[in-house]
Image (cartoon, rainbow, N blue to C red):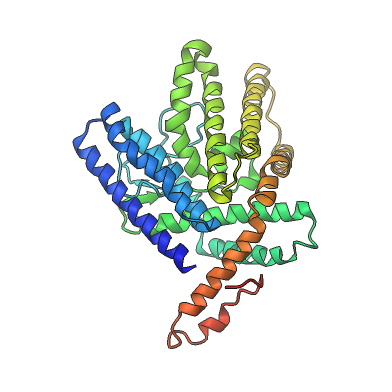
């Protein structure tokens, strides 16, 4: 654990140094190919640094922050889109006036930012009690992994789905809050009750991991939709943007899975197939909705019907394509418990006896008996 924490510290010191270099490049090098040439070495370094970390939590989150978020922001920065700062690897943005939605769905076909009120902004913010409940649920899920030998496989995968959701939201909120406390930046919305999605368009564009949606929109969707406008027209060009967005998302998720699993020989592409399938279904859904509502003037399906259909389809495809490699190849259920146990032992062994003398007895990680 000490070696992993030391590597984690070295990796993030290297990240800050690289981001500072990129900030200096932006001050001196004009946007375009020349700026990209100067920034490309940093993009390559960011693809390498997560390989230094081997834990599922530290390595996976670091890969997401720098190999995906930071690299995509660097590509946009090289093209002269948006400002760049040393917190580019976090889910925050510089404050703007008027406040604008930066994580609006890439699949809504619009290009102009939309102003929204304070009440709209707060609808994405969670209360401290909400986060406390999710921390408790994560602990309960980790405890449940100790009984994998008696739990049904589908129930275990369902637990893993909620674990990923809770862990992503807690991790992103913690990282964003840490760098946003100065007041110069604002938190980007992370999730917005994805279990209430009325369609795939609603799920992927407005409710699930809006940080990724916010970066894919300017980096992939807009260029692809703009290039397809001449061929398909403005009405149908967004479909090409959606297709390109999900193809890129499939590749990036497969890369994130590689960072976590270190699978070799090359992956089976089940994770990528999950996003390709959802991209194709989303395109079909958009076509049907436009015909159903715009052409045939039919009312949309009621939420009592559309929500269960969307949720069931999502979980069915997860059980089919997404979770099997996480369990069979990545061994996520086992590694998660191991890492929590190792971290608990690390904390207990490094808290001085004079500091909160009863704290060590409060922290108990007995989920898995492994040598520490």
Residue 303, compared with residue 329, is above or below; it is above
Q: Residue at 34% across / 42% down in the picture? A: 42
How many marks the image carries: the answer is 0
- Residue sitting at the far left: 28
| Nearer to me, 94 or 80 | 80
Viewer-closest of 111 and 13? 13
Q: Nearer the viewer, residue 295 or 360?
A: 360
Asked if 125 appears above or below 84 in the picture, the reply is below
Observer able to see residue 82: no
Find residue 30 and report its horizontal and vertical position in percent.
22, 31
Q: Is residue 220 above or below residue 101?
A: above
Using residue 120 as the reference point, say whether residue 282 is left or right of it.
right
* Residue found at x 61% / y 46%: 194
Q: Do we see residue 231 in this rendering? A: yes
Which residue is depicted at the point 27% across and 32% down?
35
Instruction: Estimate the x, y position of residue 233 in percent, counting from the top left.
Output: 51, 13
Name the residue rendered at 66%, 73% in the picture: 369
- 50 or 137: nearer the viewer: 50
Looking at the rendered image, the quarter that the C terminus falls into is bottom right
Quadrant position of residue 22: top left
**Residue 96 point in image, percent of width and height:** 32, 42
């Amino acid at each position: 654990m000490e070696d992993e924490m030391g590597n984690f510290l070295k990796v993030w010191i290297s990240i800050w140094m690289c981001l500072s270099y990129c900030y200096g490049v932006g001050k001196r090098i004009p946007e375009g190919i020349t700026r990209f040439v100067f920034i490309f070495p940093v993009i390559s370094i960011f693809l390498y640094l997560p390989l230094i970390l081997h834990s599922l939590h530290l390595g996976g989150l670091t890969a997401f922050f720098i190999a995906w978020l930071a690299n995509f922001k660097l590509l946009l920065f090289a093209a002269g889109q948006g400002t760049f700062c040393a917190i580019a690897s976090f889910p925050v943005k510089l404050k703007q006036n008027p406040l604008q939605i930066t994580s609006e769905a890439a699949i809504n076909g619009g290009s102009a930012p939309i102003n929204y009120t304070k009440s709209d902004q707060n609808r994405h913010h969670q209360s401290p009690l909400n986060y406390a409940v999710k921390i408790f649920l994560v602990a309960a899920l980790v405890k449940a992994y100790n009984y994998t030998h008696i739990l049904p496989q589908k129930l275990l995968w369902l637990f893993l789905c909620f674990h990923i959701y809770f862990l992503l939201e807690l991790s992103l909120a913690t990282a964003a809050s840490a760098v946003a406390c100065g007041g110069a930046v604002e938190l980007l919305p992370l999730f917005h009750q994805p279990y209430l999605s009325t369609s795939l368009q609603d799920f992927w564009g407005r409710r699930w991991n809006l940080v990724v949606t916010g970066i894919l929109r300017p980096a992939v969707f807009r260029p692809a939709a703009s290039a397809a406008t001449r061929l398909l027209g403005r009405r149908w060009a967004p479909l090409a943007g959606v297709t390109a967005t999900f193809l890129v998302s499939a590749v990036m998720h497969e890369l994130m899975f590689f960072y976590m699993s270190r699978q070799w020989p090359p992956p089976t592409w089940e994770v990528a197939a999950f996003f390709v399938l959802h991209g194709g279904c989303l395109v079909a859904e958009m076509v049907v909705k436009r015909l159903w509502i715009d052409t045939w003037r039919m009312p949309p399906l009621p939420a009592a019907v559309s929500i269960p259909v969307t949720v069931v389809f999502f979980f069915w495809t997860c059980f089919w394509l997404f979770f099997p490699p996480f369990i069979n190849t990545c061994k996520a259920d086992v590694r998660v418990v191991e890492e929590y146990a190792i971290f608990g032992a690390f904390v207990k062994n490094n808290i001085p006896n004079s500091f909160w003398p009863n704290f060590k007895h409060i922290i108990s990680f007995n989920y898995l008996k492994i040598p520490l």
